[in-house]
Image (tube, grey):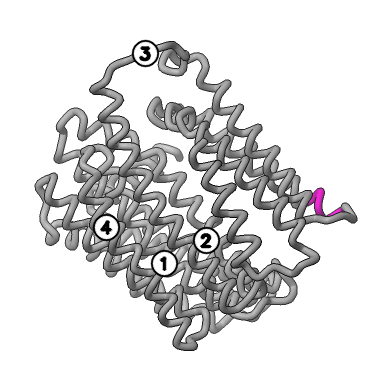
Amino acid sequence: MITFVLLEIIGLWLIYHKLVIPVDRLGASLWVFQATAISLFFTLNGIVYNSVLIARENMRIYAYIGLAEALSRLAIAMILSYLNCDKLKLYAILLLVVTVSIQFCFYFSCKKYPECKYHFFWKKEIFEDMFKFASWNTFGTAVWAINEQGINVLLNMFFGPVVNASKGISSQVNSAINNFGMNFFTAVRPQIVKSYANQNIAYFLKLVFNSSRYSFFLLLLVSLPLLFRTDYILYLWLGQIPEFASSFVLWIIIYSLINVLTNPLWSAIQAIGKLKKYCLVGSSVYLTAFPVGYIFLMQGYNPVIVFKVLVIVRLIYLFVIIKIVSDYVSFSFRDYFSLVFVPILRVTVPIVLLARWINSFFAQDFLSLLEVVLVFFLMSFLIIYWGGMTSEERLFVRNKILHKR
């Protein structure tokens, strides 16, 4: 409720007084804003049920609901292509319906669990711990939101809605490729929490390091065609490519590849429960992206500069939080470097160089795109197999393949 009220106050003030919106589209903008605010209200209340499914590792239901959501969004796109109306308003309303429906799906899927039965309960110590934990989580999320949405506001203030459209395209690409990495990591997260709760620190660290590596490899595998075929893929998708869209996509992918390494560390510190230092120091570092980006834009730089600033700040943030997490569990930066960074560099450098060379032999057409994707996948898999895996992991993969046969 607090979030919803704050949105209504601050959001409406921004729309009416700060954002650059054509007068004839102000009404549609308000529809989108209100639909988004209501969607957020239901999403925040539904997070607990989402978390229960993950904690209980009920990935089958989680996958079914995720598939239903994806198909619903595809249906929205198809419906919009056939109707002649204010598509922005209809898009916002249909997305709201999908969001609310999905949250109710999570609710009904969790009703059978005893922890999802509502009853009156009071225990001061638990509420104090939950409040502290939630407060630091909220602080970290607020900083992330300021950077992510603040960048949108900056681009709108300096360049108008056309550049915002390019930013929106890059965000869609970023969301699509990140889903692959997050779906993989969602399955790992409960094990990270459980291993720390059981004080199995060796396994806990192994999960953190390995999930960091494989999340990066998976994201690299998915994003590789986008890195080298950005213009053609955007042309297939949009027809006419907005200004700066290609550059935004390139830098947002680089940002995502760095950012994916922070997810296991965030889950690790949540499992440990010591969020204060992580959120205060880490978020303070990350928050610098907004004012630094503003300063560069004031100096007359083009909008791509804000993405470059985000990449540099996120890299610094990664090193800072590695140090913070290592203060609570016994591992050194050398351990992280040798078990995560070295395999990543050993894989990324040859993959990128080979992909650039391979890409030069293919034409810019749809058939060539399919061929490039296949070649990139096979080449990347082999390099990851030999350069990114330990001998124990390679043996595990071979055994799985032979067993399937």
Residue at 68% across / 46% down in the picture? 73
Label 3 and label 4: CA atoms lie apart by 35 Å
Instruction: Tell me which corner region of the image, top left, top right, bottom left or bottom right, holds residue 21.
Output: bottom right
- Residue 128 higher or lower than 307, as above or below: above
Q: Position of residue 27 (x, y in %)?
A: 76, 56
Name the mark nearer the viewer: 3 or 4.
3
Residue at 53% across / 28% down in the picture? 61
Q: Earlier in the sequence, mark 3 or mark 1?
A: 3
Q: Earlier in the sequence, mark 3 or mark 2?
A: 3
Q: Residues within 10 Å of mark 1 (few under 14, many from 20)?
A: many
- The amino acid marked with disc number 1 is Tyr
Q: Which residue is mark 1?
A: 255
Q: Are marks 1 and 2 in contact (CB under 8 Å)?
A: yes
- The amino acid marked with disc number 4 is Gly
Label 2 and label 4: CA atoms lie apart by 22 Å
Q: Position of residue 279 (x, y in %)?
A: 28, 51
Label 3 and label 1: CA atoms lie apart by 43 Å
Q: Provide the residue span drawn in magenta.
A: 78-82
Helix, strand, or loop for circle 4? helix
Q: Earlier in the sequence, mark 3 or mark 4?
A: 3
Helix, strand, or loop for circle 1? helix
Q: Which residue is mark 4?
A: 282
Q: Which mark is residue 174?
A: 2
Does the image show residue 163? Answer: yes
Tell me if 150 is positioned left or right of 328 in this view: right
Residue at 60% across / 45% down in the picture? 37
Tell me if 232 is positioned left or right of 208 in this view: right
Label 3 and label 2: CA atoms lie apart by 42 Å
